[in-house]
Image (spheres, coloured by chain):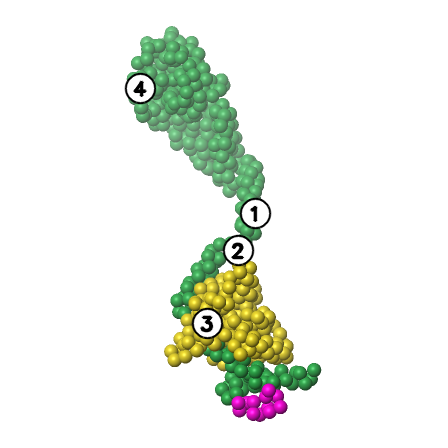
Chain colours: A green, B yellow
């Protein structure tokens, strides 16, 4: 064995000397006893070395290989190396969504008792908006809107009690007490004389007030207008002046601006006022489309006439004058008041439901003229 | 040792940047190793297209292990030459299965440029290449490493993951086997 290893080492020694450029014969001459054994191996080694020597590396092959190598490296760097990172990503996304929802709803609950000026108050409002957006049932949605209005009033009451000053917007039925003070849902309103004139005409109406609450003094009113409820739905029934839109009962007056030909089954957009617990009063109705469900004769029974022109003379994109009228209180407030009284009298003769309308609503509707 | 490692290589910096897939570093690493890989593969194959394909494939596979297994240029070289050996063996196994007679097909030998002795070089390469086909994988590998790369005994041992003595024995037997094959064909 030792002898064998010696032979292997001898070969290696000779190979090294060959590599160094020494002549084969001079190497073998030094090992006369092993020469016969070494010669064939060393000549084979020389051939093996010659076989590899003169090779030239093709430059194009090297460039191609380098290009592929770099392109593949770039591709791998861009892409996830396995599906697991992707799964992790999906997992992280799901977790993030869960946390987000938990956060929103958790914070939503936490923010429920907040009032304007507190950190979480905006969250409360956003959650409410989301609730509204997610409610497809129109009747429920309107109920929600009013529920939120009641919350605004409750918040204002709290601010009033705490003696805080904050920007607020409240909506609700306008109430007048004996000593000529005005309130919405129990929250006092500080009105200028001009606003008081307008308020008098709106007593009992569902209104919207923007202003600054100043503790016990109540809300310093910046604007006072009728609260408008806008919604869309399917016209489900037309019974005289009483229409049903997606389960919501709507009163239609002569002065209601109707765009298009309303028929049962059609989609309609409405701008309404809160009339009473059960009814909304339609200011504008716009037919937006949908399938025909009813007969032409059924339409507009509660309008001026059963004639088509009533409907067809309405031009698209007519501005809703009632909104503008309610926004800015006119300097001459005595006039509308008088008009409203006249309107009330005239209404009593023409329509049962009309007599119950708050006076100014009648005067605010531009097409309404005393008979 | 004409093809051994260049000593001035920025070993650590190059590999660190290559691990980050820095294009400059990868390009440098590729160009350092490519001639050795190509030389090794072409030593064992006489199909230039296959030489290019296998050499290129070696580097694509290097990307798989670069971060995990390759910490020095020396280990990168050991890895690419070892992989080249495996790919060459795969190539022959597939060829054998397809029953292509590689022994008679010498039309497309690699491009040898030795103006005076081009024909002679081709003949020697052909002779050795054909003889080597009957050696074991390890015998082919050790001959290719020692005579295509002119690696030292120690380097070869490192490449093959064997002891120096084991390589001494292996190369002895490989040369003896090569001698027998050459004798059988041409003597």
Q: Which residues are magenta?
A: A25-36
Say which of marks 3 and 4 sits in front. Answer: 3
Local SS, label 2: loop
Q: Residue at x 38, y 8 (%)?
A: A350
Instruction: Say which residue label 3 marks.
Output: B35
Say which of marks 4 and 1 sits in front. Answer: 1
Instruction: Say which residue label 2 marks.
Output: A81
Q: Are marks 4 and 2 on the same chain?
A: yes
- Mark drawn on residue A314: 4
Q: Residue at x 41, y 18 (%)?
A: A292
Mark positioned earlier in the residue sequence (1 or 2): 2
Mark positioned earlier in the residue sequence (4 or 2): 2
Local SS, label 4: loop
Q: CA distance from mark 2 to mark 3?
A: 29 Å
Q: Are marks 1 and 2 in contact (CB under 8 Å)?
A: no
Q: CA distance from mark 1 to mark 3?
A: 46 Å
| Residue A34, magenta (yes or no) | yes
Q: Are marks 1 and 2 on the same chain?
A: yes
| Residue A207, magenta (yes or no) | no
Q: Are marks 2 and 3 on the same chain?
A: no
Local SS, label 3: helix
Left or right placement of residue A97 versus residue B107 in this view: right
Name the spot of residue A294 as percent of width and height, x first.
Answer: 42, 14
Q: Residue at x 30, y 14 (%)?
A: A309
Confirm whether residue A157 shows in the render: no
Name the spot of residue B103 as percent of width and height, x first.
Answer: 50, 67
């Amino acid at each position: 064995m030792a002898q064998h290893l010696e032979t292997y080492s001898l070969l290696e020694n000779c190979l090294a000397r060959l590599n160094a450029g020494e002549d084969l014969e001079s190497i073998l001459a030094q090992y006369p006893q092993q020469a016969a054994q070494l010669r064939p191996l060393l000549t084979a080694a020389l051939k093996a070395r010659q076989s590899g020597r003169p090779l030239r590396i093709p430059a194009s092959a090297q460039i191609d290989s380098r290009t592929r190598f770099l392109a593949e490296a770039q591709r791998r760097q861009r892409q996830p190396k396995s599906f697991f990172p992707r799964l992790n990503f999906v997992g992280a996304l799901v977790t993030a969504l869960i946390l987000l929802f938990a956060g929103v709803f958790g914070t939503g609950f936490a923010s429920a008792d907040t009032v304007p000026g507190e950190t979480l108050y905006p969250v409360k409002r956003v959650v409410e908006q989301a609730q509204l957006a997610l409610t497809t049932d129109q009747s429920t949605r309107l109920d929600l809107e009013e529920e939120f209005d009641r919350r605004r009033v409750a918040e204002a009451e709290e601010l009033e009690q705490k003696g805080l000053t904050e920007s607020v917007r409240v909506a609700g039925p306008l109430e007048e007490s004996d000593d000529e003070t005005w309130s919405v849902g129990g929250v006092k309103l500080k009105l200028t004389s001009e606003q008081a004139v307008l308020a008098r005409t709106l007593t009992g109406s569902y209104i919207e007030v923007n202003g600054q609450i100043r503790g016990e003094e109540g809300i310093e009113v910046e604007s006072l207008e009728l609260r408008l409820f806008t919604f869309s739905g399917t016209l489900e029934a037309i019974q005289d002046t009483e229409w049903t839109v997606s389960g919501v009962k709507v009163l239609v007056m002569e002065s209601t601006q109707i765009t298009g030909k309303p028929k049962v089954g059609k989609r309609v957009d409405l701008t309404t006022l809160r009339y009473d617990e059960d009814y909304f009063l339609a200011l504008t109705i716009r037919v937006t489309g949908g399938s025909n469900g009813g007969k032409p004769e059924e339409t507009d029974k509660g309008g001026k006439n059963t004639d088509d022109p009533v409907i067809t003379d309405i031009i698209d994109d007519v501005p809703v004058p009632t909104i503008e009228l309610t926004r800015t209180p006119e300097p001459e407030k005595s006039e509308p008041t008088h008009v409203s009284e006249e309107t009330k009298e005239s209404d009593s003769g023409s329509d049962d439901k009309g007599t119950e309308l708050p006076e100014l609503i009648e005067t605010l509707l531009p097409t309404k003229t005393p008979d | 040792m004409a093809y051994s490692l260049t000593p001035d290589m920025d070993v650590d910096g190059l590999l660190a940047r290559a691990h980050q897939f820095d294009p400059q570093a990868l390009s440098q690493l590729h160009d350092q190793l490519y001639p050795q890989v190509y030389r090794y593969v072409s030593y064992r194959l006489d199909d230039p297209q296959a030489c290019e394909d296998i050499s290129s494939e070696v580097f694509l596979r290097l990307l798989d292990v670069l971060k995990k297994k390759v910490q020095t240029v020396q280990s990168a070289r050991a890895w690419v030459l070892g992989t080249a050996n495996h790919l060459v063996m795969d190539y022959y196994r597939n060829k054998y299965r397809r029953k292509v007679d590689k022994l008679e097909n010498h039309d497309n030998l690699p491009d040898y440029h030795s103006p005076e002795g081009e024909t002679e070089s081709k003949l020697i390469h052909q002779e050795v290449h054909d003889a080597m086909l009957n050696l074991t994988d390890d015998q082919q590998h050790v001959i290719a490493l020692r005579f295509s790369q002119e690696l030292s005994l120690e380097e070869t041992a490192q490449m093959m993951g064997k002891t120096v003595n084991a390589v001494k024995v292996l190369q002895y037997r490989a040369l003896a086997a090569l001698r027998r094959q050459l004798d059988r064909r041409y003597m």
